[in-house]
């Protein structure tokens, strides 16, 4: 499905990012696997993917909070002198607090990682994409809480909602250049990020779903792969909910 | 994950396979490993031959099923034919439909009835039959081909758009009723797509619409078929009750 594509994926250390890395490699994509920190486990995982699927998976380490590190990462990717066909922005953080309790410092930190750094990184990568004049695809990971709101997630939901606005504008600006831009809105996915949520809250959420279970990271990865691939050639400016039908 | 075809081992029913989007869905599903009951209104030699060709080329079984969507007896007979294969039905794509363009004030009662009958009521009844079959295995994915007109409401499309809006609403209800029984239901909302249906619109309207489309081109039947492939397959196993616009962003 993705064979011959070169993809940049951020946040590949764990959760949805890791599952997306695995899904892309298994479906024939070469991947610059971006991560926050270098670990032995991650290095050997990337090597194993390369070996197993006959692709290359290159770890790229940088902290999204550090503009210099973002720049260095982009330089590293550029130095390979090959086109970037797909960019998937996954890295993000959640800091839960009620509206009346959330500090502006927390808001700024969440926006820095979930929004500003992703826009900045995407600007660099789009520049690269334009250089090769290939068709390309960008996928942002928003959230259902950006669309529906969610108690205790003021910072997270607003930062993810900002991504939707950016995605729609980027889609309009970049469509004529052959670059599609879409977002996904995962629901409650079985990842570490949701391990901090009390189980009774999870059970309440599940009761509102059509498919009465949590989603798997691999199910989110499959949709990202669809949007990254040529299968979605005529889809841009859209947000796809992967939420088991939460009402 | 890699070597396996996306619909390997799946059995799918697709309506409206004689041409346009349905034809492309049939081809795409077969190419991706699905056996297809290819539904069309009337028997035709070219259709039969094409079904045979697809079966041979992709090592699947493409079986023509003929029935007039709005003829209840013919529909029953078609369901019987499908049941007689004694195979699980994994996928249903309700694609067959008619278009109707007329200003609100000019739309006739007969056309309103006919459009709703073909685009909403008939696929509703057909889905009732097929869901019964899917429930036996507690597994199924239903993909209904709606329209951007069913979401946006466009001049001259009040009747057609309403028929597709009805499809969208009932799909969401179905998704909620059957979600815990392993059955998913989603819609695709195509925008301007290069099929015979387009001939019902004037070039002027088409060009105007394309101007307001980010991608500045009309969709191809293959674009819609690829989205149907995604929603029909297990790639979308946690997606239900959704409407996916395949419209180049109108």
Image (cartoon, coloured by chain):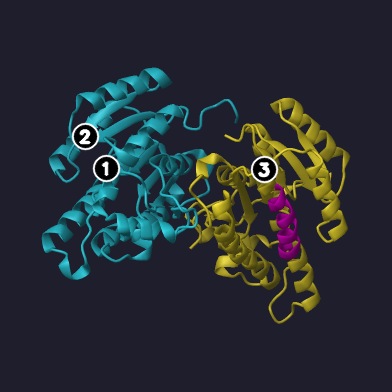
Residue A191 lies in magenta, yes or no? Answer: no
Residue assigned mark 2: B78
Q: Nearer the viewer, residue B207 or A28?
A: B207
Spatial CA distance of label 3 from label 1 is 51 Å
When asked about the image quadrant of residue A142, the answer is bottom right
Same chain for marks 1 and 2? yes
Q: Is residue B233 above or below residue B184?
A: above
Instruction: Tell me the crowding category of disc 1: few under 14, some 14 to 19, or many 20 or more residues within 10 angstroms, Cα based.
Output: some
Would you say A97 lies left or right of A142 here?
right
Residue, x 46% and y 51% (percent of image)? B240
Residue A123 lies in magenta, yes or no? Answer: yes
In the picture, the disc for residue B129 is: 1
Q: Position of residue A152 (x, y in %)?
A: 67, 72
In the picture, the disc for residue A21 is: none
Give the chain of mark 3.
A
Instruction: Tell me the crowding category of disc 2: few under 14, some 14 to 19, or many 20 or more residues within 10 angstroms, Cα based.
Output: many
Residue assigned mark 3: A132
Highlighted magenta segment, given as a residue range = A114-128
Same chain for marks 3 and 1? no
Give the chain of mark 2.
B
Spatial CA distance of label 3 from label 2 is 52 Å
**Residue B139 showing in the rendered view:** no
Residue, x 40% and y 28% (percent of image)? B30
Q: Earlier in the sequence, mark 1 or mark 2?
A: 2
Chain B pictured colour: cyan
Q: Nearer the viewer, mark 1 or mark 2?
A: 2
Would you say A100 lies left or right of A75 here?
left
Spatial CA distance of label 1 from label 2 is 10 Å
Q: Position of residue B232 (x, y in %)?
A: 44, 41
């Amino acid at each position: 499905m993705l064979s011959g594509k070169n993809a940049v994926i951020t946040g590949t250390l764990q959760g949805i990012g890791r599952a997306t890395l695995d899904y892309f490699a298994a479906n024939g994509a070469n991947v610059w696997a971006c991560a926050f920190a270098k670990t032995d486990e991650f290095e050997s995982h990337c090597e194993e993917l390369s070996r197993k699927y006959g692709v290359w998976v290159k770890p790229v380490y940088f902290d999204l909070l550090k503009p210099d590190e973002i720049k260095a990462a982009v330089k590293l990717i550029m130095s390979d002198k090959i086109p970037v066909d797909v960019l998937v922005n996954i890295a993000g953080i959640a800091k839960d607090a009620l509206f009346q309790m959330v500090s502006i410092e927390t808001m700024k930190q969440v926006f820095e990682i979930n929004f500003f750094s992703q826009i900045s990184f995407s600007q660099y990568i789009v520049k690269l994409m334009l250089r090769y004049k290939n068709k390309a695809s960008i996928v942002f990971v928003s959230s259902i809480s950006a669309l529906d709101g969610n108690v205790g997630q003021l910072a997270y939901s607003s930062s993810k909602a900002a991504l939707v606005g950016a995605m729609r504008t980027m889609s309009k600006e970049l469509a004529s250049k052959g670059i599609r831009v879409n977002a996904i809105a995962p629901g409650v996915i079985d990842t570490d990020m949701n391990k901090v949520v009390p189980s009774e809250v999870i059970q309440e959420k599940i009761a509102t779903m059509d498919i009465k279970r949590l989603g798997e990271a691999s199910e989110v990865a499959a949709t990202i792969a669809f949007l990254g691939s040529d299968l979605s050639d005529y889809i841009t400016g859209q947000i796809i909910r992967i939420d088991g039908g939460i009402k | 994950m890699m070597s396996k075809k996306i619909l390997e081992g799946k059995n799918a029913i697709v309506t409206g396979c004689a041409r346009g989007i349905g034809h492309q869905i049939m081809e795409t599903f077969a190419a991706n490993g699905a056996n297809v009951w290819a539904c069309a209104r009337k028997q035709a030699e070219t259709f039969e031959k094409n079904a045979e060709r697809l079966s041979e080329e992709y090592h699947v079984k493409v079986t023509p099923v003929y029935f007039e969507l709005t003829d209840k007896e013919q529909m029953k007979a078609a369901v019987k034919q499908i049941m007689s294969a004694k195979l699980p039905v994994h996928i249903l794509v309700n694609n067959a439909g008619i278009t109707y363009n007329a200003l609100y004030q000019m739309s006739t009662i007969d056309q309103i009835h006919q459009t709703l009958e073909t685009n909403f009521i008939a696929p509703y009844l057909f889905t009732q039959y097929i869901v019964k079959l899917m429930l036996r295995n507690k597994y199924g994915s239903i993909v209904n081909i709606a329209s951007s007109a069913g979401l946006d409401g466009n001049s001259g499309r009040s009747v057609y758009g309403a028929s597709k809006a009805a499809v969208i609403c009932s799909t969401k209800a179905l998704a909620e009723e059957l979600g815990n029984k392993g059955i998913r239901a989603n819609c695709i909302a195509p925008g301007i797509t290069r099929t015979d249906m387009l001939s019902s619109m004037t070039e002027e309207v088409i060009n105007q619409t394309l101007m307001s489309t980010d991608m500045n081109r009309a969709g191809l039947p293959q674009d819609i078929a690829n989205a149907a492939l995604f929603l029909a397959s297990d790639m979308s196993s946690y997606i239900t009750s959704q409407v996916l616009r395949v419209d180049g962003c109108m």
